[in-house]
Amino acid sequence: MSEEEKRVEEEMQEAPIFGDLLDSIISHVPLIDLLPASQVSHSWKRAVSLSLRRPNNKLKPWLILHAQSTREPLSVNSAYAYDPRSKLWVHIEHQPSIKSNSFSALRSSHSTLLYMLSPSNFSFSLDPLHLSWHQADPPTVWRVDPIVAVVGYYAIVAGGAYEFEDDRLAVEMYDTRSRTWETCESMPETFMYSASSIWVSVAVDSSRMYVLEKIKGIMYWFDPCTKIWHGPCNLRQNDGESVYCCCIGFASGRLILVGIIEEENENSKRLKLWEVYGDSWEKQREITEMPKEMVEKMIADDDFSSASNSSVGVTIMGDLVFVYNNSKPEELFFFEINGTPDAVTVNWVSVENAAVDKIGLIERVVVSCSDVGIPDLRRAASMSVKVDRLQ
């Protein structure tokens, strides 16, 4: 090879990658691999940041499965997450803070919240990878599996009181700024026998907590500023269809209702989603129906008994809606909401749960959803929390 050829080859090897070519490369790189890429140089960091802002390469919420031992101590050893953008399962090695409260059951609420509540402690986290936890004194009323939500600066604990307590529907609110508890208006009588996280679905927006009785389809909403409940609203009025189990959640500001429908003349079930809107949430419009073959794969007919309604799980964040069966975790389903409210387009996707074989027989799974970005991965790395491909 001549000197001129060597010089040209060296220049080609050193030539920077930029523009559309670099953007195209970044769009095919999983998020967990973009962290080291963004640390190559300032230009690469800027290129990664700009690429992730493009509509065709935007980040998507992760579905996270937290595995907790059912034997004391109730340690949370690890978590497994699915990244829809990268179509990749990852393993998250949990940090010590989530293991510290090892005698409380880990629970989730309104897709993004993880919490642990015991007679001696209350801890909760909204952090995307749950690297930070807020520790607080427990509420004054002793409870078992109450409804828990965080709205703004307030953590709300409602219902679930033990029978020896004076008010089984008691509501207490914790102010994260003053670190004090306040007593609020009790839950409506509708929830007298269902004021537990098993029997209700919870959603939050920037100012309110919404609680839906799954079987009755009755929804009330609570304002932490006034400490007053509002409602009711019957969400089961869906053009005469027999909706007998439903859940709610917010997708990019839209209140979404997910309902299981039982066919009167057929031994089959359907699953539909509606957007709920109006000043008093009195209006609905259908968004999509889950393909029949997916419904059949998700849950067998005998799983649709009223006793097993809690097995159907729904997690909503951003424009993504995840649907799964807690008792049949081998496969998960989701779709992304696109378009305007009057012209919504969806594409249902089935995903094999690669974490099934990693979760032990004595572990229970708690599901949450998080907007995970490069800053979150960088913070995890600084805390020696490993986030790697699931092997």
Image (spheres, rainbow, N blue to C red):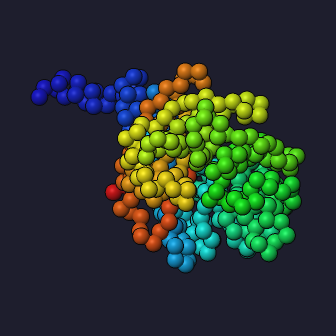
Residue 21, given in percent of the width and then of the height, sits at: 36, 25
Which residue is more in the foreground, 69 or 343?
A: 343
Q: Quadrant of residue 189?
A: bottom right
Q: Toward which corner of the image does residue 223 lie, by quadrant?
A: top right
Q: Quadrant of the C terminus?
A: bottom left
Along the horizontal axis of the image, is 354 left or right of 169?
A: left
Q: Is residue 244 visible to us here?
A: yes
Horizontally, residue 110 falls left or right of residue 50, namely right
Residue 29 percent coordinates (x, y): 38, 38
Q: Residue at x 36, y 31 (%)?
A: 25
Q: Residue furthest front?
A: 265
Q: Image point 82% across, 43% down: which residue?
A: 230
Which quadrant would residue 179 be assigned to in this image?
Answer: bottom right
Q: Is residue 50 visible?
A: no
User: Against 261, is 4 above or below?
Assistant: above
Residue 162 on image: x %, y %: 75, 71
Which quadrant: the N terminus?
top left
Q: Residue at x 67, y 65 (%)?
A: 145
Q: Residue 39, image x and y in percent?
A: 46, 42
Instruction: Find the residue positioned furthest to the left.
Output: 1
Count of number-bearing discs: 0
Compared with 231, 325 (above or below) is below
Q: Residue at x 18, y 23 (%)?
A: 4
Residue placed farthest to the bottom in the image?
72
Q: In the drawing, does residue 259 fall left or right of residue 115?
A: left
